[in-house]
């Protein structure tokens, strides 16, 4: 697979595949990185599409840089999308987990021609409230503390919750297909169904899947879904 590594401003990026006039921006989720686009880029190249992937703060080559939050990630994604639109006549989007939420915030006013979401976070306030329940933290406690670490590895933030509530996804004018795991412990099926109905998305459910697609069976299902989506 042909790769060109470069800095998009100060953002480490990879351009995958031979030149073409149609491209896709790949946005990773928590724990990912620009290299996570490799499998998708192989499939995209087979149908004549280049892929641009970037490292968001705290990930990949930016592991020591704080800011895996909407204040930092959203401007980075906008910058990548602007770069991609200058290069390609058509821009699609492929995003994982929280990367989907960041991308919708970043591209709400200039949506991609098509979007493919895997295990997307679609209602961030609800997810934060769910994690607060897991941690046994009330809104009053979080507001007073500002930030609270949890024993499941996430830090709860009052500012983050306020931001999420004040920045709902009010419109998403991009034809979107979603691959959802039936055993997703972060995003409830009712949340996905409501989003699909509201925005007219396509939905494929892998009932035995988990939020992170990682087993051989889950990865095979992801590949099959991706192939079908790219052929449409």
Image (spheres, rainbow, N blue to C red):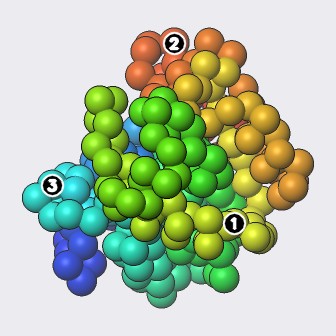
Q: Earlier in the sequence, mark 1 or mark 3?
A: 3
Whether residues under marks 1 and 3 lie with C-beta atoms below 8 angstroms apart, the answer is no
Q: Is residue 82 visible?
A: yes
- Residue found farthest to the bottom: 86
- Residue found farthest to the left: 64
Task: Find the distance from the CA under tag 3 to the CA under tag 2.
Answer: 30 Å
- Which picture quadrant has residue 32? top left
Figure check: 45 above or below 80: above
Q: Earlier in the sequence, mark 3 or mark 2?
A: 3
In this view, the residue in front, 13 or 119, is 119
| Residue at image coords 76%, 70% | 170
Q: Earlier in the sequence, mark 2 or mark 1?
A: 1
| Residue at image coords 38%, 49% | 156
Indicate the secondary structure of the residue bearing disc 2.
helix
Figure check: 146 above or below 134: below
| Residue at image coords 51%, 45% | 138
Tag 1 residue: 169
Tag 2 residue: 217
Task: Find the distance from the CA under tag 2 to the CA under tag 1.
Answer: 32 Å
Figure check: 71 above or below 103: below
At which x and y percent is residue 116? Answer: 63, 50
* Crowd rating for badge 3 (residues with CA inside 10 Å; few <14, some 14–19, many 20+): some
Q: Which mark is residue 179?
A: none
**Of the residues tagged 3 and 2, which is closer to the observer?**
3
Task: Find the distance from the CA under tag 1 to the CA under tag 3.
Answer: 28 Å
At which x and y percent is residue 22? Answer: 56, 68
At which x and y percent is residue 25? Answer: 48, 63
Tag 3 residue: 63
At which x and y percent is residue 19? Answer: 41, 68
| Residue at image coords 67%, 67% | 168
**Of the residues tagged 2 and 1, which is closer to the observer?**
1
Whether residues under marks 3 and 2 lie with C-beta atoms below 8 angstroms apart, the answer is no
């Amino acid at each position: 697979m042909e790769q060109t590594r470069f800095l998009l401003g100060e953002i480490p990026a990879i351009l995958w595949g031979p030149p073409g006039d149609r491209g896709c921006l790949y946005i990773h989720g928590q724990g990912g990185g620009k290299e996570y686009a490799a499998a998708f880029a192989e499939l995209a190249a087979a149908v004549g599409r280049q892929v641009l992937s970037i490292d968001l703060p705290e990930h990949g080559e930016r592991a020591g840089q704080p800011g895996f939050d909407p204040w930092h990630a959203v401007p980075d994604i906008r910058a990548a999308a602007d770069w991609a639109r200058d290069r390609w006549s058509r821009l699609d989007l492929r995003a994982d987990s929280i990367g989907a939420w960041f991308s919708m915030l970043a591209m709400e006013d200039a949506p991609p021609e098509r979007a493919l979401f895997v295990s997307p976070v679609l209602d961030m306030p609800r997810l934060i409230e769910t994690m607060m329940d897991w941690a046994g933290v009330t809104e009053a406690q979080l507001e007073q503390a500002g930030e609270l670490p949890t024993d499941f590895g996430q830090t709860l933030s009052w500012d983050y919750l306020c931001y999420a509530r004040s920045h709902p996804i009010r419109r998403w004018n991009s034809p979107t297909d979603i691959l959802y795991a039936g055993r997703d412990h972060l995003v409830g099926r009712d949340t996905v169904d409501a989003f699909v109905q509201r925005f007219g998305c396509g939905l494929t459910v892998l009932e035995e899947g988990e939020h992170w697609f990682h087993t051989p069976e889950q990865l095979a299902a992801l590949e099959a879904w991706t192939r079908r989506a790219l052929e449409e």
